[in-house]
Amino acid sequence: MAREVLGLMRGKWIGAPIKRVEDPRFLSGEAIFAGDISLPRMLHAAFVRSPHGHAKILSIDSSRAAKMPGVVLVVTAKDADFKPLVDLLPPLDGLQKTPQPLLVKDHVRFVGEAIAVVVAEDRYLAEDAAGELESAIQYEPLPALVDAVKAMDEKTNLLHPELGSNVFYRKKVKVGDVEAAFKSADKVIKRTYHTNRVSAAPMEGRACVAKYDKSFGQLTLWISTQSPHVDRNLLAESLEIPENKVRVIAPDVGGGFGQKQPTHPEELVVAAMARRLGRPVKWVEDRREHLLASAHAKEQTINLEGAFKKDGSLLALRAQCIGDSGGYSFNPTSGLIEPSFSATGIPGVYDLKNYEYEIVGVLTNKTPTGPYRGVGWTAGNTAREALLDLAARELGLDPVQIRLQNMIQSDQFPYRNCIDMLYDSGSYVETLKKACEMAGYDDFRKQQVEARKAGKYLGLGLCVFVEPSAFGSDVAAQMGWPLPSHDNASVSMDPSGKVIVSTGHLGHGQGHETSFAQLAADTLGIDVKDVIVQRGDTESAPWGMGTYASRSAVIAGGSISYAARDVRDRLLAIAGNMLEAPAQDLEIEDGKIFVKGSPNQSIDVTEVAHAAYYNPRIRVKGVEPRLQSTRFYDPPACYSNGTVIALVEVDIETGITKLRRIVFVEDCGTMINPFIIEGMMAGAIAQGAGSALMEHLVYDASGQLLTTTYMDYLIPTAADLPSPETAHLETPSPFTVGGIKGMGEGGVISTPSAVTNAIMDALAPFNPELRDLPLGPDKVVKIVQAAIAKA
Amino acid sequence: MEQKSELTLTVNGEAVSRTVPVRRTLGDFLRDDLAFTGLKLGCEHGVCGACTVWVEGAPIRSCLMLAIQCQGVEVTTVEGLAKSEDFGILAQSFTDNHGVQCGFCTPGMLMTASAFLKANPKPSEAEIRTAISANICRCTGYKGIVDSVKTAAERLAAGKAGAGRAQGRA
């Protein structure tokens, strides 16, 4: 029997670990990704990109390229029929948004920036001509700025001279009495941490196919995206097509992790080419283009200073988060979110009273940055947890103890933190204790001592995190990004009683087709198999902002259950007429509607649905018989939490770190599908481990990106990782529909910290310090050799 | 003009003859000319393994092989694998162990895993991890995939043992 829990109807489906309904098409090879789409008379686009990090374009001679075999069109900025990336968002105090051209005209700001597009009969021919055109562009190279800390003070070499500075955003906030806290401290520790520039690197890169129907003036774009409606809006604005004549379809999407949330310039150009030529145009980036020009992420320099008492009490923190945002503020705020969310994320799970932070968004000659799983929180958590470990070491305290004593305790919720974030509920202490128990913390310390005697270096590192996971307008504002973030869902039941759920939250690996069906099935009292979740088509889905920031479980959860409730109410009203019973006395279970307590006298949902459509006599006065509803949800803020513990073994000769175990205890409130949650946890850990140990987009001093293949940009393989050991606590949010909190990012937020802290712990006899990530073999060997040289 | 060549081969059990540009990769040929889009191009540098197909039953990177190198050979893509006898067990094992998330690496992973299980029907976890380290997955952290391959091995072995016993009794 379904019961209502925190506004959500819960029956047999929510909380059940059911298998994913979307799997069969992926396993058989029948799934259709954007790159799999082929249309009659389709052309292929290739982009010509800057080989310089910073340069003036002196001339472009496209005459030879235009005459190459199969070439249909070559377009540069001077003959563009589209506007630069348009800003759709309200202004943000202090943010100087940089305009970003779709094809750069005269001033290139990063290697890989698109200068021209070639459209040809096939991709090989398009690339031939793009290669030819590449050699027909004259540049005047300018000194490249590849260090954000230097770029922020640069007075003459400016990426966007009209801003008068390379700093596009700067904000300072101080709460409590930070000076007094530092004065009264027994120990002040100040360090600089540099987090690595990485790529979300989904297995499918960017890809799109555009088609323009000239007679009707309608544009259709199939695109690998997380946000079809936002893309539609940008297409309409940039190409100046009425938005009701733009249709965006996200077919199956091969991973996104945040990177495919912002619309990229190339995607708009491809659409413009289809319009200009009246033929479909396809563009599928290759991996080199992906690493060069798809949004980068997470590079920051964080200056962090902590004031501690001898007993380990954390009195105050001061942070300066300098975001290395690349060539543009991008799309137009993506460059800001990284340092901004770091600064607001640094208080984290701690009961901190005094905090001062500065956010600096800096333009450099690198690829613009965008969201990637755990935006900002990864860097902030990594810096803070490293500082806490250092404090524990210098004060002679246990790293678990120093965290426990400074942590927000479970009886303090809801807890308004020092910068006005309202943590709805949580289990910070409990997840830490549970993770320590699973990791065998006390025993480990003994093993560590014994192993060292035998020349083996074992280490344990941990990170306790809280993450904003109902990314609606409320949580966005609490994180210092006061911009809209809401969504809608439709639920409709057809005359045969089958249900379609439609939302802008398309899944791209998260199993939305399964979890969302569970939500609707419980409210409607039907089998989950009778619900289909439609994916990413602006023509069928109600307007939505898309899938990002762990928001879908909460926002789709709310909007789907509201819409399903409307359908349920109408169904029951009609059934009441048919059963001659008051609707409020009726219950639905297993597809049957009956008076509570009398399940034997029932009527099938299918019968009621059929009647709703075909029998005018059963209508109820004042109730539309339409079994369809679209509802909106913009949830109050809520926060998931958890603890990751990494156990490593470091070979001090080779510098290689072996991840022996990863323990992850997560609390994301009400779980819709624990089976899917487990998989998301494991995936996030892998990405976090990658950025801790190997993933790094490296630039040289001239602004050249050195890591443009998977042979240089290393992604963890199955041989690099252990299977994580996971556990769940379930503390429902008191604020959101059903107490659902959302999840998926915790592993990326906290694994880099847990793994790097574990390496520091393993190397403790060599007095190591974490300064920058990734912590690959080269750095480990340096730490060991420096200690030996000193001894 | 691009140089072209005649090519005759067998794909998923069917004879195919085409004129192809000599520089066309096997992956592009299978996807664009024959519409076997199950195989995916993830890196086109031979690293990620998403484009894995079988040539004469052995897994290869179709992004690194030219179509014309496949004169007279037998090529199998995931669409062909999906028609094979044991595919149901393999696919169900992936579903039961959350071996699929976004699904983009899945076809290549299945081609690698299936060939591996033929060569090593009773693998250890370490052997599975080494085998599938030829394929990158960005979503699952591999736990679901390792468990899927392990389960498939067990189920295939049980099925064969069952079939063997049944035959023995008959």
Image (cartoon, grey):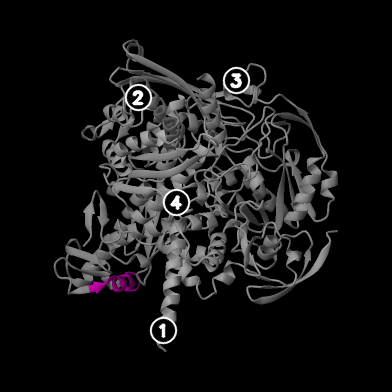
| Residue highlighted by disc 3 | A150
Q: Mark 2 or mark 3: which is in front?
A: 2
Three-letter amino acid code of the residue under disc 1: Ala
Query: In the drawing, what numbered circle is on residue A392?
Result: 2
Q: Amino acid at mark 3?
A: Lys
Q: Residues within 10 Å of mark 1 (few under 14, many from 20)?
A: few
Q: Judge whether residue B112 is colored magenta.
A: no
- Residue bearing the label numbered 4: A505
Instruction: Give the structural element (helix, strand or loop) at label 2.
Output: helix
**Chain identity of mark 1:** B
Q: CA gap, disc 2 to disc 3? A: 32 Å
Measure the C-alpha gap from mark 3 to mark 4: 40 Å
Q: Residues within 10 Å of mark 3 (few under 14, many from 20)?
A: few
Q: Measured from the top left, where is residue A305 in percent x and y?
A: 41, 19
**Element assignment for label 3:** helix
Q: Are marks 1 and 4 in contact (CB under 8 Å)?
A: no
User: Which label lies toward us, 1 or 4?
Assistant: 1
Residue count near mark 2 (Cα–Cα under 10 Å), binned few <14, some 14–19, many ≥20: many
On the image, numbered disc 1 is attached to which residue? Answer: B166
Position in image of residue A392 (x %, y %): 35, 24
Say yes or no: labels 2 and 1 on the same chain: no
